[in-house]
């Protein structure tokens, strides 16, 4: 079991009526009490009715207690998993962590508080944000709060199959979304999802004509439309009020909605120059689940004090395998020229998937050749096909 499994086990308790305290209690109040009252009013012997009711109250108490036991167990598991994933007190592991102590300097403590506050605000957990504002001297900017609320609202709408708020946001921000160098394909993907959810072919095509023709130069709009003519609208989801069919499409639909939500979040963050991901989440994930802290501790156990003071390291002296989503390529060095890519000498991807810098590409184009032979594999890439890559 890891933290997320323990947390989902805990969460699943709240959705089950047998383990939620309000489940049995509600049944007692709504059914048993109401029933007893009407029986007494209709002239039944109150003594009999009350004795029965007492029995039911006792049973209900037992049920609530049983549910509570489940809660305590699941809560305990979460605590155990948290302890397992995060080393308890770093200072007890090594002096390196307590000399100088972590987050004691006012500046460092404030930076930590700020990172936590930003993370809470970004997720829209406002009661926690307010509690933290009360406990520290920090405050979350009202303008940011407004944006974060909007982001959460639109994400929730997308996940519940309502793409309208996202589409409205796209049209309000259409200039930003369509401007170079990174014109966004988000509006197209949103419209495509609506298009695919419309069962009636004629209706679907008229939707495409109305909203999607602007994306013709960059997206396979015609393929999408002709595909629908040949095969019919196969996906069955309920989007924006268009009714549809089939259960099996639900899982696929959910995946697609999650993709759209992610895509939307990326564009929203880009629009307001927020980091793409929550920095605190990335740090914690790399440190704990990503295994970085584990690796350092393992190395320390093996190498002892030879490892030196970890706080003085500029980079990790050991390799830490990261999940693909956590690999960042902010720097690209051309494998041919060994030079770092710049805006004037950007990386270019060849047909085979190998990447070299533009200057190296142009050098390989000498003698009026129109194609370049990849320096790593024999594949040729024509000048017009090589694409600039953005990291
Ligand atoms: Zn190649």
Image (cartoon, grey):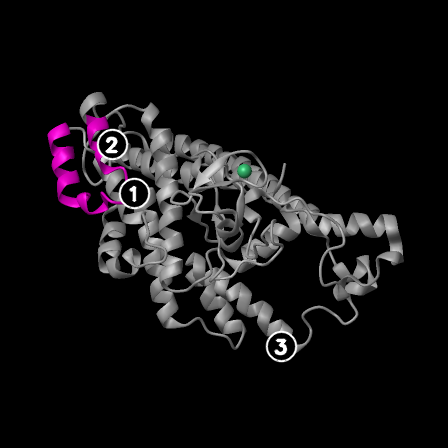
Tally of marks = 3
Give the secondary structure at mark 3: helix
Q: Magenta span covers which residues?
A: 201-228
> Pointer 3: what residue?
107
Number of the label disc, if any, that sits on residue 189 = 1
Can residue 359 be seen by looking at this rendering? yes
Q: Kindly give the residue lying farthest to the front in the view shown.
A: 367
Give the secondary structure at mark 1: helix
Front position in the image: 380 or 316? 380
Above or below for 27 versus 301: above
Give the secondary structure at mark 2: helix
Q: Where does residue 100 sit, x and y in percent of width and height?
A: 77, 72
Above or below for 245 versus 7: above
Q: Check if mark 1's residue and mark 2's residue have beta carbons within 8 Å.
A: no
- Label 2 vs label 3: CA separation? 57 Å
> Pointer 2: what residue?
223
331 vs 149, left or right, is right
């Amino acid at each position: 079991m890891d933290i997320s499994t323990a947390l989902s086990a805990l969460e699943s308790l709240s959705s089950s009526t047998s383990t939620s305290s309000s489940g049995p209690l509600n049944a007692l109040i709504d059914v048993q009490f109401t029933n007893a009252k009407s029986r007494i009013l209709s002239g039944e012997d109150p003594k009999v009715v009350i004795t029965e009711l007492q029995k039911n109250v006792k049973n209900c108490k037992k049920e609530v207690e049983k549910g509570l036991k489940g809660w305590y167990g699941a809560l305990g598991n979460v605590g155990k998993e948290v302890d397992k994933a995060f080393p308890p007190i770093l200072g007890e592991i090594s002096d390196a962590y307590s000399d100088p102590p972590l987050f004691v300097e006012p500046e460092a403590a404030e930076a930590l508080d700020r990172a936590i506050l930003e993370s809470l605000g970004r997720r829209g957990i406002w009661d926690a944000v307010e509690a933290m504002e009360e406990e520290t001297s920090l405050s979350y900017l009202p303008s940011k709060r407004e944006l974060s609320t909007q982001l959460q609202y639109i994400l929730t709408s997308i996940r519940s199959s309502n793409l309208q708020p996202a589409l409205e946001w796209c049209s309000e921000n259409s200039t930003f979304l369509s401007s170079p160098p990174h014109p966004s394909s988000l509006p197209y993907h949103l419209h495509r999802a609506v298009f695919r959810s419309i069962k009636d072919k004629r209706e679907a095509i008229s939707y495409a004509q109305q909203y999607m023709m602007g994306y013709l130069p960059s997206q396979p709009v015609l393929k999408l439309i002709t595909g629908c003519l040949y095969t019919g609208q196969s996906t069955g989801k309920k989007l924006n009020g268009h009714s549809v069919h089939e259960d099996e499409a639900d899982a696929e639909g959910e995946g697609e909605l999650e993709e759209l939500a992610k895509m939307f979040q990326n564009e929203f963050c880009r629009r307001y120059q927020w980091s793409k991901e929550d920095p605190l989440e990335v740090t914690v994930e790399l440190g704990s689940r990503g295994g970085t802290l584990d690796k350092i501790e393992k190395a320390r156990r093996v190498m002892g004090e030879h490892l030196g003071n970890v706080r003085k390291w500029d980079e990790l002296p050991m390799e830490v395998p990261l999940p693909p989503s956590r690999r960042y390529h902010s720097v690209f060095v051309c494998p041919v020229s060994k030079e770092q890519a710049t805006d004037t000498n950007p990386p270019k991807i060849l047909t085979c998937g190998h990447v070299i810098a533009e200057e190296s590409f142009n050098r390989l184009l000498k003698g009026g050749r129109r194609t370049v032979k990849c320096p790593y594999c024999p594949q040729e890439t024509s000048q017009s096909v090589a694409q600039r890559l953005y990291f």
